[in-house]
Amino acid sequence: MIKRSFLGLAKPRLQYSVTVGTVQELPVPSKVILLLKEPQNGGRGNGLKVGDSVKTGQRLSASPEGVEYVISSVTGTISDMAPYVGMLGQKCKAITIDASGQDDWDDSFNKEPTLDAALKFFEYAPGNPSFKAFTDPEKSISAIVINGMDQDLLLTANQYVVQNEAADIKGGVDALKKMTGVDRIVITVPDNLVQQASTTGADVKSVSATYPSSLPHMIMKDVLGEVVLAGDSVEDAGVVFMSAEAVAALGAAFQTGQPCVTKIVTVVGKDGKTTNVRTRIGTPLKDVLQACNVSLNDRDRLIMGGPMTGAAAHSEELGVEPGTDGIVVQDETNSAQVTDYPCINCGECVRICPVKIPVNMLVRFLEGRFYEDARALYDLDCCIECGLCSYVCISRIPIFQYIKLGKYELSLIEIAEAVNE
Ligand code: SF4
Ligand code: SF4
């Protein structure tokens, strides 16, 4: 998450980066680490074990019928399987695969674009596209939005794909229409990419380069003219969002018969310099940083994602995930520390909030763990998770993290209530 002092690196400007540049191709790493989520029902299965040989593009799951899976991004041998607790307590298995250095492709992926193939192979594709809404009888999906603008500041992976891989996006658009039956496909891009986007077969809409115009809820309001009700997801409103990188991966996969096993990542060094790299999913962060000549010292801050909405990573041994659009390294002296200072009611957070939440009041209830009151009285569910309130908070209260935690705790309550019904 970006805070005031991060901007010591450069003059504060909450504009998306629209200068794309090139992508540096990284070699196959010596090992990858893939996080396999544990099933919500607690079932563990015994489908994988240390010593198993795996092929590039192979679907790895705890059991043959397992819903949770990862796609092996290398050919090699599983050398370790360890429990791992991810963001907000998500239980995972960290699977380490020692790479042989040469790809032997698994052939179980079928080139026919079907929803079943998408569910089985592309929920772990770059950009983390989700196809579950298309099979949910309670949702009626009438449009797909391809986000060709990156969602956080400084990141340019998706814009790179629109600029350089429009043909693959077009293939993905055709596949999406065929597998979902949805005809209305929109691509949102900054003004400078309208021409490239017009070759993708999707309906092109331009979005402002001012943060947070590229967040799904903002696109719903500003581009589609629809307001998502508090507590609803964009899928509840009938729209599925996917990144340009995800749709290009889809198009390329159905063209080649090989699922995509790489991810484009924008690396932001301590001096604010950005480098785009394409690397195998699961590549240890330290390999990526090394390739970009970014050093990481004790007490530096390592962030997976963008500066506004990314999450701190505790180790550079973690692997690049399908949703890792950025890796940000902040020097200890330039990274703002959160505090336990009280809110001084300055109102900055309220003024900057794009959905006009009374954040100064909301944060008091979240700090006190009165999550249900925060939802009922102070619009917790309206938050679109832009992080702007944390960015401007003079007391450096970690508001954004409180909000994420509050929503997560409420989701646990809802699950427990549903189980007990
Ligand atoms: S993160 Fe903060 S500023 Fe952004 S929508 Fe939520 S409450 Fe408002
Ligand atoms: S910006 Fe921070 S200190 Fe100011 S009102 Fe909001 S929470 Fe309170």
Image: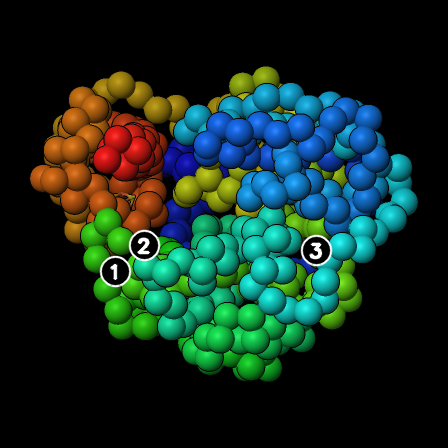
Q: Amino acid at mark 2?
A: Ser
Residue 19, quarter of the rendered image:
bottom right
Residue 161 appears in the figure: no
| Residue 366 higher or lower than 229, as above or below | above
Residue 421, quarter of the rendered image:
top left
Q: Earlier in the sequence, mark 2 or mark 1?
A: 1
On the image, numbered disc 3 is attached to which residue?
Answer: 260
- Location of the N terminus (image quadrant): top left
Of residues 17 and 406, the one drawn nearer to the viewer in this rendering: 406
Element under disc 3? loop
Whether the residue under disc 2 has CB within 8 Å of ligand 1: no
Residue drawn at (40%, 33%) of the image = 5
Q: Residue 301: horizontal and vertical position, in percent?
A: 52, 27
Q: Quadrant of ligand 2?
A: top left
Q: Residue 114: horizontal and vertical position, in percent?
A: 60, 67
Residue 379 appears in the figure: yes
Q: Please name the colour scheme applied to the rendered image.
A: rainbow
Label placed on residue 86 = none
| Residue 36 higher or lower than 183, as above or below | above
Q: Amino acid at mark 3?
A: Cys
Element under disc 1? loop
On the image, numbered disc 1 is attached to which residue?
Answer: 228
Of residues 412 and 101, the one drawn nearer to the viewer in this rendering: 412
How crowded pointer 2 is (Cα within 10 Å; few <14, some 14-19, many 20+) is rated as: some
Distance Cα–Cα, label 1 vs label 3? 32 Å
Q: Earlier in the sequence, mark 2 or mark 3?
A: 2
Label 1 near label 2: C-beta < 8 Å?
Answer: yes
On the image, numbered disc 2 is attached to which residue?
Answer: 233
Element under disc 2? loop
| Residue 42 higher or lower than 209, as above or below | above
Distance Cα–Cα, label 2 vs label 1? 7 Å
Q: Amino acid at mark 1?
A: Val
